Image (cartoon, helix red, strand yellow):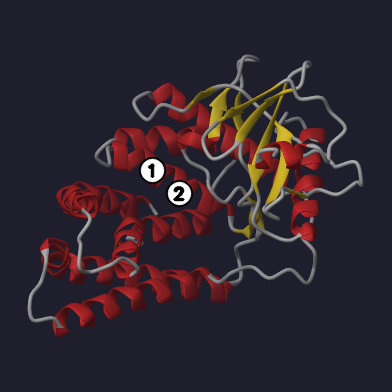
Amino acid sequence: MYNQPEVALEKYELTVSRIIKGRGAYICDIGIGQKLLVPYRGHEQRACTLRDTLAFIQRNGMDVEQISQTKEQCIISRDNCEDAYILKDYRAGRECSTDSIDDMRGGSRALAQLHNILEKYPLPSDIEVESLHEKSQRKCAQIVKLKNYILRRSKTNAFEHLFYECYERFLEQGQKSAEILCELENSKTSVPIYCHGAFNQHNVVYTQSGRWLPVNFETMHPGYPETDLAEYMRKMLEKNHWDTAVADAILDSYCSVRSLDDTSMRLLQALLLFPEKFCKLCNHYSNSRKSWVCDRDVDKLAQLIQLSGEREEYLHALQAIV
C-alpha cells in the first residue's frame, strides 16, 4: 500500500524521485528542483486565496514559494485517509539565527518588504478582520478562569504555585494592553492587510541567492502588519533577554524599508505589552491532565518569571519613545 504522501502526490503532473520527511512536511525531489508537500487545514477557497496572494507577491519582486495545482486544477490534494495537503516550491536556506544581529536585521527587512507588497494587495470588502481587543480579552479571561480553578483546589502543584506568584502582574499587563487595543480599534486609523501569521526565526531563510525570504505562509490571514512585527520581535527578544540593542536593531531595520507612524508604534507597544507567552503556558496547562504536571511547563514558567524584570525594563523604555 502506498504511503500517504505518495497518494497525495499522485494527483500532480510531476515525477517524484525521492521523498524526505522534514519538519511537519515532505521534501520531494522532482529532478529539476524540490517541492514541499505540507498538511493543510482550511477549505479550498482559502487555499486559492493563498495561492493568488503568493503569486502577487512574486510578481511584485519577492521570490516567495508558489503553490502547485493538481491535474484537476485544484489546490488541495488528499491522501488515502482524506487528510489535506498543498504542494509548494521548496525554498532551501539557512534559518534566521537568534544569536546573530545581522540575521535578525535581515529577517526584519524581509518582513518590511513583504508588508510593503501586501499593502498593495486589495482585501475583499466583506472580509472580516479579527478584533485584537476581543482576542486579548478572551485570553485575559482564561487567566482569571485558571486562577479561580487553582483557588478551589486544596493542594497546588509546582506550576500552580508559580502561577499564583505572578498572575496578577501578567493579568494587569494584559488588561492594559486590551485597553490600548480597544482605543486604537475604535479610532479606525490602522489599515488591515494580509499578514504572514507566523513570522519567526523558523519562517525566514537566507537563500543561496543571498536574500532573506519569508517562507511557510499557511497561516496567512487578514490583520494588522504590526502583529507580524510584534511576534518576530517577541521571539527574538525572548532569546536575548529583552536586550534593548537587539530591539533597536530589529526596529531600525524594519523602518529602513517601511516606516512606522505614531499609531503603528502604539499598536506595536500594546502587542508587546500583552503577556503572550504567559497566556500560551496557561492555555496549555488548562487543557492538560492535572494528575501529571509537565516539568517543561514548570521550567518555562520559572524562566518567564525570571526574565520578567528585563522584559518590563524594555517595555518602559519603549513606552518612553511612543
Q: Residue at x 28, y 67 (%)?
A: 289
Return the x and y of residue 182 as percentages of the image width and height.
48, 75
Pick the front one: 91 or 20? 20
Q: Secondary structure at mark 2?
A: helix
Distance between the alpha carbons at the discs numbered 2 and 1: 6 Å
Determine which of the numbered discs, if any, sits on residue 231 in the image: 2
Question: What residue appears at the point 74 percent right and 41 percent down from the top-left corner?
Answer: 7
Under circle 1, the secondary element is helix
Question: Percent x, y for residue 221?
Answer: 64, 57
Residue 167: image quadrant is: bottom left
Quarter of the figure that contains the N terminus: top right
Q: Is residue 279 above or below residue 317?
A: below
Query: Outermost residue, front direction?
Result: 1
Q: Amino acid at mark 2?
A: Glu
- Say left or right for 140 vs 258: left
Q: Residues within 10 Å of mark 2 (few under 14, many from 20)?
A: some
Give residue 65's quadrant in the image: top right
Question: Callout 1 environment at 10 Å: few (<14), some (14 to 19), or many (20+)?
Answer: some
Q: Which residue is mark 1?
A: 235
Side (left or right) of 40 relative to 51: left
Residue 256 seen in render: no
Mark on residue 218?
none
Q: Name which residue type carries label 1.
A: Lys
Q: Marks 1 and 2: in contact by CB < 8 Å?
A: yes
